[in-house]
C-alpha cells in the first residue's frame, strides 16, 4: 500500500518553490538585462503574464488533459476539470496530488515565458496573450502528455527526465516559428542595458534548476541527489568551455558568454539528469557549448531569423543535443535505463524519433497559430512604438527615472 512520505513531500515542496524562482524572477531578470533600457519593463511583463496564463490553464484543464487516462496516446481523457475529484488526501505516488499538480504547473508556466525572449521589443501584448492561450492548449499540453502523461512517446520508451523535449525543444522551436511570422526588429543589435540583471537572473535560474531537475525524481533519494550533481557538473563544464571559446575567437572572455554557457549546460542536462553519471554530464556540458555557440554566431546570421535573445539557439538546440545525448550516455547504474554506450543503441533511435516528433509538431502548430493571429488581430507594434520603446508607448511607464 502506497502512503504519503513526509520526506518526499518536503523535498518536492521545496523544489516547487525553486522552479517558481526560475521564472519569477529568474527568466524575467535574465531576459530584461539583455534588452535595451526602453524595453526592460515590457520584457519583465511578458514573463509574468506567461506564468500567470500557464498557471490558470493548468489548473482549469491542462493537468486533466496531460495526466488523465490516455486516449490512443495522443491526449488524456479530461476527468478533473478545475481539479474536481482531487482532494487534500489524494496521492500521486508518495506525495500529495496537489503538490504534483503545482510542481508540474511551474513547468507549464515557465515554458511559455522562455519563448518571450525571442520576441522582445516588437510584439503586441494582446497578441502575446492570445498566442500563449492557444500555444499552451494546442502545443504544450499535447507534448507533455506524449512524453510524461502516458502518451505515445512515453509508451515508446522516450527518456526525458525533466523537460528536454517538453520544455526546451518545445519552447525553442516554437520561438523560431513565432519570429519567422513576426519578422525582424528594426534594430537587431544586441546591446544589453544591464548585464548585472542578467547575471542575477541566471543565478536564480541555476539555483532553481536544481529543484527543476532534482525535484523531478519526486522523492528525497539518491536519484534526486544524482540529478542535482550532474546538473551542476554539466552547467559549469559548459560555462568554462564557452569562456575558452570566447577567449580563442574574440581574444577575451565575456560575462555574456559565461552566462550563456551556463544556461546552455543547464538546458542540455535536463533530459539526461536522471539517467547519466558524472562523466556523461561532463561530455554533455562540453559539447553543448559548441552547439549553442554555433547556432548563435553562425547559424542565425546565415539563415537571417531574428531570435532576439537566442531561445532557439540555446534552448532548442541544446535541448535537442541533451535528448540525443541521453540516448548515448544513459547509465543503468543511475536509473535502470541504458543508452548506446551501455549496449542499447535502440534508445538512441527512440530519442531521435521523439526529438523529431516534438520539434516538428511544436514548430508547425506554433507557426499556424502565429499566422492566424497575424491575419486577424495583428502581432506587431507599429514602427513608432518600436523605435520609442514599448515601456513608454504600451505601458506608459519607465524602468528608470534619471
Image: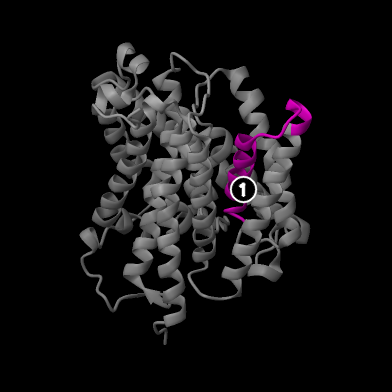
Residue 150 in view of the camera: no
Q: What is the quadrant of residue 271 in the picture? A: bottom right
Q: Is residue 59 left or right of residue 301?
A: left
Which residue is pictured at 28% across the width and 79% down the height? 89
Residue 128 image point, x, y percent: 31, 32
Query: Overall secondary structure of the magenta stretch?
Result: helix
The answer to whether 338 is drawn above or below residue 266 in the figure is below
Give neighbour class at mark 1: few <14, some 14-19, many 20+ (Cα, 10 Å).
many
Give SS at disc 1: helix
Rendered residue at 30%/19% (across/down): 381
The location of residue 207, given as percent across then percent down, is 52, 57
For the C terminus, which image quadrant? top left
Tell me the quadrant of the picture where the N terminus can be found. Answer: bottom left
Does 400 sit above or below residue 211? Answer: above
Q: Residue at x 20, y 65 (%)?
A: 84
Residue extent of the magenta highlight: 247-272
Which residue is outermost to the bottom? Answer: 1
Colouring mode (rainbow / by chain / secondary structure / one colour) = one colour
Position of residue 52 in the picture relative to residue 234 (left or right): left
Q: Nearer the viewer, residue 125 or 153?
A: 125
Which residue in the structure is indicated by mark 1? 268
Q: Is residue 29 left or right of residue 334?
A: left
Amino acid at each position: 500500500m502506497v502512503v504519503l512520505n513526509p520526506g518526499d513531500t518536503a523535498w518536492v515542496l521545496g523544489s516547487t518553490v525553486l522552479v517558481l524562482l526560475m521564472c519569477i524572477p529568474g527568466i524575467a531578470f535574465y531576459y530584461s538585462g539583455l534588452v535595451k533600457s526602453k524595453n526592460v519593463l515590457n520584457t519583465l511583463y511578458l514573463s509574468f503574464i506567461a506564468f500567470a496564463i500557464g498557471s490558470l490553464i493548468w489548473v482549469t484543464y491542462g493537468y486533466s488533459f496531460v495526466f488523465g487516462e490516455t486516449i490512443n496516446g495522443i491526449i488524456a481523457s479530461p476527468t478533473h476539470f478545475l481539479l474536481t475529484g482531487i482532494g487534500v488526501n489524494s496521492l500521486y505516488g508518495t506525495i500529495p496530488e496537489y503538490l504534483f499538480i503545482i510542481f508540474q504547473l511551474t513547468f507549464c508556466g515557465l515554458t511559455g515565458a522562455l519563448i518571450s525572449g525571442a520576441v522582445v521589443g516588437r510584439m503586441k501584448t494582446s497578441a502575446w496573450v492570445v498566442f500563449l492561450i492557444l500555444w499552451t492548449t494546442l502545443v504544450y499540453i499535447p507534448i507533455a502528455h506524449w512524453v510524461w502523461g502516458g502518451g505515445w512517446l512515453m509508451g515508446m520508451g522516450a527518456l526525458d527526465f525533466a523537460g528536454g523535449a517538453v520544455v526546451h525543444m518545445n519552447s525553442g522551436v516554437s520561438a523560431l516559428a513565432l519570429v519567422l511570422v513576426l519578422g525582424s526588429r528594426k534594430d537587431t543589435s544586441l546591446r544589453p542595458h544591464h548585464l548585472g540583471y542578467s547575471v542575477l537572473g541566471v543565478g536564480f535560474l541555476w539555483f532553481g534548476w536544481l529543484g527543476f531537475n532534482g525535484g523531478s525524481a519526486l522523492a528525497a533519494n539518491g536519484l534526486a541527489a544524482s540529478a542535482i550533481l550532474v546538473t551542476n557538473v554539466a552547467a559549469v563544464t559548459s560555462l568554462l568551455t564557452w569562456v575558452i571559446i570566447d577567449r580563442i575567437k574574440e581574444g577575451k572572455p565575456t560575462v555574456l558568454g559565461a552566462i550563456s554557457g551556463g544556461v546552455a549546460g543547464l538546458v542540455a542536462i535536463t533530459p539526461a539528469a536522471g539517467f547519466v553519471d558524472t562523466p556523461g554530464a561532463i561530455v554533455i556540458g562540453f559539447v553543448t557549448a559548441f552547439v549553442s555557440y554555433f547556432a548563435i554566431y553562425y547559424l542565425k546570421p546565415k539563415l537571417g531569423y531574428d531570435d532576439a535573445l537566442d531561445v532557439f539557439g540555446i534552448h532548442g538546440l541544446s535541448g535537442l543535443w541533451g535528448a540525443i545525448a541521453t540516448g548515448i550516455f544513459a547509465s543503468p547504474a543511475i536509473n535502470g535505463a541504458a543508452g548506446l554506450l551501455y549496449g542499447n543503441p535502440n534508445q538512441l533511435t527512440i530519442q531521435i524519433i521523439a526529438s523529431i516528433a516534438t520539434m516538428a509538431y511544436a514548430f508547425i502548430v506554433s507557426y499556424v497559430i502565429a499566422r492566424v493571429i497575424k491575419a486577424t488581430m495583428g502581432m506587431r507594434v507599429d514602427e513608432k512604438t518600436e523605435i520609442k520603446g514599448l515601456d513608454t508607448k504600451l505601458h506608459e511607464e519607465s524602468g528608470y527615472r534619471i
